[in-house]
Amino acid sequence: MDVFFYVLEGTGIVEIGSEKQAVSEDTLISSPAKIPHCWYNESQSTLRFLVVKTPKPVKSTKLL
C-alpha cells in the first residue's frame, strides 16, 4: 500500500525514513509502504494535509 500526502494549507517539514524536506501548499508527497513518516509544523500557522492510502494494483491499468 502506498501513502500519498497532499498539503492543503501552510508549510511544514515531512520526514520519511531518513529524509526530511520542507513542504508547502499544493505539494504532493508519495511515501512507500512500511516506511516510518513524521510531520513537523514549526510555525504558528495552520498546517493541513490530506492523506490517501492506495493498495498496489493487482492488474495493469487500462484506459478505455
Image (spheres, rainbow, N blue to C red):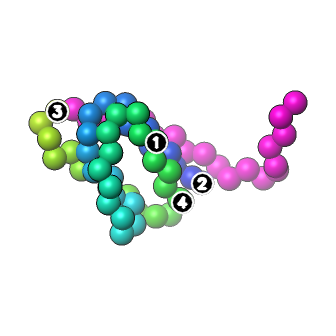
Closer to the eye: label 3 or 4? 3
Which label's residue is closer to the chain start, 3 or 4?
4
Amino acid on which disc 4 is placed: Ala
Q: CA distance from mark 4 to mark 1?
A: 16 Å
Question: Which image quadrant: the N terminus?
Answer: bottom right
CB-based contact (under 8 Å), mark 4 and mark 2: yes
Q: CA distance from mark 1 to mark 3?
A: 20 Å
Amino acid on which disc 3 is placed: Ser
Where, by quadrant of the figure, is residue 12 drawn?
top left
Which label's residue is closer to the chain start, 4 or 1?
1
What secondary structure is found at the residue carrying circle 1? Answer: strand
Residue found farthest to the right:
64
Closer to the eye: label 2 or 3? 3
Amino acid on which disc 1 is placed: Leu
Q: CA distance from mark 3 to mark 4?
A: 29 Å
Q: Residue at x 39, y 60 (%)?
A: 16
Q: Report which residue position mark 1 lands on.
A: 28
Residue 52 in the image, given as x and y percentages of width and height:
51, 40
CB-based contact (under 8 Å), mark 4 and mark 1: no
Q: Which residues are magenta?
A: 46-64
